[in-house]
Image: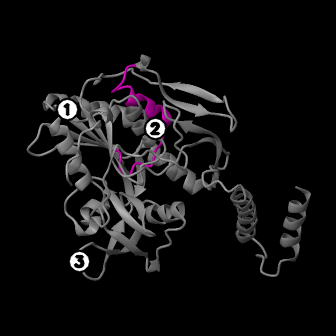
Amino acid sequence: FDELDAVVDIVESSYYYRPAEGDETNGFDDSLEQNAIMGMLSGLDDDYTTYLAPPEAEQFQNQLAGTGVGIGVGFYENQGQATIARVYPKTPAEEQGLLSGDVVLRIDGQPVDASNWERFNLTIEGEEGTQVRLTLQRPGQPGSFDVTLDRRPYDIPSVAYRMIEGTTIAWIQIGIFGTRTTEEFDAALETMANDGATALILDLRGNGGGWVRSAQEIIGRFLPGDAGPALYEDLDPGRGGEVEKPILADGPEYFDLPTIVLTDGNTASAAEIVAGALRDYDRAMVVGERTFGKGSVQRVFDFTNGASLRVTIAEWLTPSKGRIQEQGITPDIQVSVSNPEESQTDTVLQTAVQLAQSGRTQPSDLTNVATPAT
């Protein structure tokens, strides 16, 4: 890297706008280093081999650990707009009445740049004790409105549970595969059993992934360990590099409970592993939209300054050796919601309920059988 070192020396000694002294000089040097790293990685043409500066790395780890500091919302990108996917309980966002579907137009008066998703999330969260002013647009309402929120610590539940009204069907949503997901999921399963549920709808829509081990454990609640691999990890771009990763059936067993999995275009990574495995073993039907297609594996390297480097080392395959990367998981029944803002009906969930009530919850149940209207 002789030429890189030479460029740094020239910029530090000759660049007209370089800081003259003090802390600004150190910050300038740090920015040169980080920009060089990010520029180098951008040349790999791999969106998932990334460098996270200390604040971004800390936020990423907090999300997986189920904690955060900020206003208490989860976002997804919808046609270039930053849209609220979840409002976490007992948070400033809930107290101020923010709702799923609200679109963030401006942050502290500045237009939102949804192209840099990690930077956007970092801007929203911020430091404890500070405030952020959001300009929001709510579907079905004219104009926009402003709300100022205090940032503070909060817990991020990765699992939500309820019984679907008027049925004996349980609904469990997994928002992320984090450190506490399996524990929270097992608690929801126990509550579901006490409520007398006769079927389960597992909602993975909007789930961007997380820990693979957590995905293996969730699969193990529905399939025995000797059913086969939970997935394959392909370590070689050529042939023959597939390594089996086991189903971790070390908890409560719901091997016979009729189950349907819901997916959308934001279902990614570990969530795709779960959906792919349950479908491949004919254990659960997948309903909704084709998933995101994030099937690459990243190893995380942590640095002493708090930064981290995520490097792609392999790809995941489903138990039938179906490729997830760029392909995604195609649902057994595809249900698209073209304009969810204009509809109060969750047509994907409605379709799943109809299927469960008809007794069709496995892919093999669809052979030569018409699907319900939506």
**Foreground residue, 344 or 34?**
344
**Foreground residue, 58 or 1?**
1
Residue 234 appears left or right of 143: right
Between marks 1 and 2 in the image, the one whose residue lies nearer the viewer: 2
The kind of secondary structure element at disc 3 is loop
Is residue 242 in the magenta section?
Answer: no
Q: Amino acid at mark 2?
A: Ile
Instruction: Find disc 2 in the rendering and name its residue.
Output: 273
Rounded to the nearest angstrom, the CA distance separating label 3 from label 1 is 37 Å
Residue 123 appears left or right of 306: left
**Looking at the image, is mark 3 or mark 1 earlier in the sequence?**
3
Q: Amino acid at mark 1?
A: Thr
Give neighbour class at mark 1: few <14, some 14-19, many 20+ (Cα, 10 Å): some
Instruction: Find disc 1 in the rendering and name its residue.
Output: 191
Is residue 215 in the magenta section?
Answer: yes
**Looking at the image, is mark 1 or mark 2 earlier in the sequence?**
1
Instruction: Find disc 3 in the rendering and name its residue.
Output: 141
Q: Are marks 3 and 2 in contact (CB under 8 Å)?
A: no
The kind of secondary structure element at disc 1 is helix
Rounded to the nearest angstrom, the CA distance separating label 1 from label 2 is 25 Å
The quarter holding residue 369 reads: top left
How many marks overall? 3
Q: Which residues are magenta?
A: 204-224
Viewport quadrant of the N terminus: bottom right
Q: Amino acid at mark 3?
A: Gln
**Foreground residue, 267 or 372?**
372
- The prevailing secondary structure element of the residues shown in magenta is loop
Percent x, y for residue 341?
27, 68
